[in-house]
Amino acid sequence: MKISQLSQLTGVSIRSLRYYEQQGLISADRESNGYRTYHPLVIDQVNTIKFYLNLGFTTEQIAGFLNCVVMNKEAFCSQILPIYREKLTEIEEQIQLLSQIKSNLEDRIQAVMLENPNPPGA
Amino acid sequence: MKISQLSQLTGVSIRSLRYYEQQGLISADRESNGYRTYHPLVIDQVNTIKFYLNLGFTTEQIAGFLNCVVMNKEAFCSQILPIYREKLTEIEEQIQLLSQIKSNLEDRIQAVMLENPNPPGA
DNA sequence: ATAAACCTTCACATAGATGTCAGAGTCAAT
DNA sequence: ATTGACTCTGACATCTATGTGAAGGTTTAT
């Protein structure tokens, strides 16, 4: 299939598909005219990439384990565990930071409301 | 005081101090030679800026309410409440998104461990 | 053959705070 | 007067995925 079709089927922009290829995440054959031709399996692959991008991995990180994930469905791929765990820790730290910020913000709101019992927008 | 002193006292780089000035967050008098001279009150102001940057506000947003905060200690500044609330909502959304990502990640980890009962790094 | 709808590559833009460097002026101390 | 430590402005780099546009080749249908 051609690139616009892959784009439609995956919901990923043409621009991004070419970018993924440039980053080594997907590959494409070329027709004689230079057009990219994709194997149907690439659809799954792109969806997998979407999934990991949503998880907060960068394309570079994804490139590091995508083959493993795609080929083996994660079995026999225990190398991926530390990566997941590292990411998990990172996410947890972000959540903690945001929670702290949230607390601070709630404190500020309380402070304003106490000093200003009848604000217009309350 | 001069800029390097302010930098030391606040822990904010000289580069950033100049940037804050450019964004209208702080102001400086100039000596006859062109050097910036800061009023001691600016120290507090810079610390306040640090605080709000940590809260995730942009310098542009901070510029919008900094005068109010610094001058009035937030009293009589009920206009600031909607801004805080908006930011709070934003933070809460980020936390929720991260929590979902965290769940997904934990699922992946479970999946790998089930398919791979005795991984080297476990 | 001409237009519409594809495809290609290359490259610049974005967002935001900060690092860093270059070129140049200034001040203090020797 | 020279050196070292400051200061100034201006500008480019960073990080990352994606948007956008130009300039040009291809295919398909009329």
Image (tube, coloured by chain):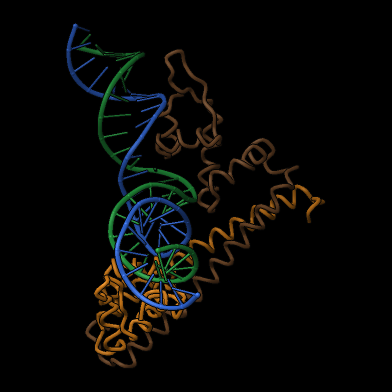
Chain colours: A orange, B brown, C green, D blue
Image coordinates for residue B51, horizontal then vertical, percent: 53, 47
Q: Is residue D3 above or below residue B101?
A: above
State the residue in front, A107 or A4: A4
Whether residue B28 sits left or right of residue C23 in the image: it is right
Q: Where does the image place residue B28, in percent across and percent down from the top left?
A: 52, 25
Q: Quadrant of the N terminus of chain A?
A: bottom left
Q: Is residue A51 left or right of residue D30?
A: left
Q: Quadrant of residue A79?
A: bottom left
Instruction: Give the residue at x 55% y 36%.
Output: B25
* A45 relative to A113 in the view: left or right: left
Q: Quadrant of residue A85?
A: bottom left
- The location of residue C2, given as percent across then percent down, is 44, 62
Is B64 situated above or below D7?
A: below
Residue A122, by quadrant, is: bottom right
Residue A60 visible, this angle: no
Residue at horizontal 54%, vertical 29%? Answer: B27
Q: Nearer the viewer, residue B24 or B78?
A: B24
Is residue C15 found left or right of A102 in the rendered image? left
Residue A8, percent across and down? Answer: 46, 77
Q: Residue at x 55, y 71 (%)?
A: B96
Total labels drawn: 0
Q: Nearer the viewer, residue A57 or B110?
A: A57
Can residue B54 be seen in the rendering of this structure? Answer: yes
